[in-house]
Image (cartoon, rainbow, N blue to C red):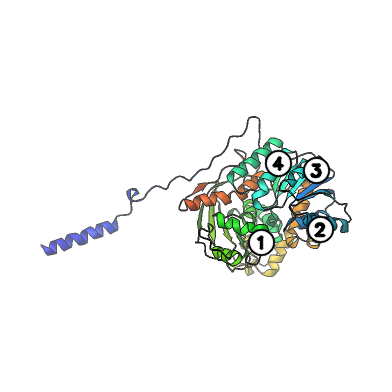
Amino acid sequence: MKKVLNFVLIALMAFVLSVPATNATIKKSPKPIKTHVPKRSKGQTDVVNLATPKMDVVRVGFIGLGMRGPGAVSRFTHIEGTDIKALCDLYPERVENIQKNLEKAGRPRAAAYSGSEDAWKQLCERDDIDLVYIATDWKNHAKMALYAMEKGKHVAIEVPGAMTMKEIWALIDMSEKTRKHCMMLENCVYDFFELTTLNMAQNGVFGEVLHTEGAYIHNLEDFWGSYTNNWRLDYNEKHRGDVYPTHGLGPACQLLDIHRGDKMNYLVAVDTKPVNGPAAVKKLQGRESKDFKNGDHTLTLIRTEKGKTIHIQHNVVTPRPYSRMYQLTGTDGFANKYPTEGYCLRPSQVSSDITPNHEDLNSHGFVSKDIKDALMKKYKHRIHTELEETAKKVGGHGGMDFIMDYRLIYCLRNGLPLDMDVYDLAEWSCLAELTAISLENNSAPVTVPDFTRGAWNKVKGYRHAFAD
């Protein structure tokens, strides 16, 4: 009897091991979590490719003269066709310091606003300003931009453009309602490797682009004290998720033609526990942070309508070298910026004017420095051809800040669509809230709304506009 039972058990185990898993043992994945998408108001239309009337001179008012504002004002003194009309900051000494800089640059003193939490409203209400340039802390970005557009101004907002979905939809609706530009000041899309690589991608060098990566990995340990009233560390303490995604996501989205032929469909986020964040609070403020929200490292995966993927990371508290990652994976090539700049291409993708001897190339290692330099020279973007020399002299993160400001003014003066519109602002900023929703729901997938509300495929391919 015992032998019979053993035989039966062995036979049963063999049968179980030989049977593949069935649908009965696999739970169907839940549908992605959706957020509210407000209906577009009657008579209101999208602002994809919005162009406004040309203006000979762009009259500008600046709000926020702490960390980034002063550099922006300085750069504008080098841009033809601009008139710096007004300056605003909570602290009057900051305004006065910039006035002195204007005088040194041969520019007239601007109207000054300071000393009140609402002084910026007076700037927005002036009838001699075309563009309001906002460089304050994150929590004020959206409300200032909304008021400025309501008062008939175009707006340019430092990154991130908005921190919540409610703010994002409000900015979209106000831009569509007023037909005013609402651009986020994302400088990294103008960096030299990124813009050259974008041009290469648009010329088919990498084949079909399938996957892109980006990040903001920057240890802010030495910078926390520079943020007035500790606002940036405080934001990380109170909010979970990728709260600063745009430096990595912007270039990644341009490579994939997001809302210009493709769109982001859903995301999934995971994070580590918070360790160095609470330690920073203890070190700087001498108190225990009992409920620090943001993990030390956050990772987000995104899938698009056309089956492409994006990987984004955020880490501002661990000792790591600065990195925006910036990677592109295509059917015929690869690009990488951090920690090593390089291209990997099928030999057939490298033209004979770059190297006549394709035997020296392979598709599993970076091309040589000489070939990389030749590629970057051949595919140097027109924007860099025209502006690189001046940009590096004027400065601003190596020149990319100047290019960003110059392009903004160039497009306004020539009545062209801006390089980045309000939907870019929405797509690149939405990770702040959407990743938090994913994380708080055990890394559940979360739908990324179509912020264009149906117009995402109206334009075929991302391109910069030029007057000629």
Disc 2 crowd, CA 10 A, few/some/many (<14, 14-19, 20+): few
Q: Which residue is mark 4?
A: 147
Q: Helix or strand or loop: what does disc 3 sit on?
A: loop
Q: CA distance from mark 1 to mark 4?
A: 51 Å
**Which x, y percent locates residue 435?**
53, 52
Q: Is residue 328 visible?
A: no
How far apart are the alpha carbons under marks 3 and 2?
A: 21 Å
Relative to 316, say whether 138 is above or below. Answer: above
Label number found at residue 364: none
> Which residue carries the number 1 mark?
350
Report the side of 160 relative to 275 (left or right).
right
Residue 97: which disc? Answer: 2
* Mark 3 surroundings within 10 Å by alpha-carbon count, few (fewer than 14), some (14 through 19), many (20 or more): many
Residue under label 3, please give it: 129
Spatial CA span between label 1 and label 2: 52 Å
Three-letter code for the amino acid on which mark 4 is drawn: Tyr
Q: Earlier in the sequence, mark 1 or mark 4?
A: 4
Of the image marks 3 and 2, the number of the one nearer the N terminus: 2
In this rendering, which labeled residue sits more in front, label 1 or label 2?
Answer: 2
> Mark 3 or mark 2: which is in front?
2
- Gap in angstroms between the C-alphas marked 4 and 3: 13 Å
Residue 22 percent location from the top left of the image: 33, 50
Q: Is residue 347 above or below residue 159?
A: below
User: Closer to the camera: disc 2 or disc 4?
Assistant: 2
Where disc 4 sits, the SS reads helix
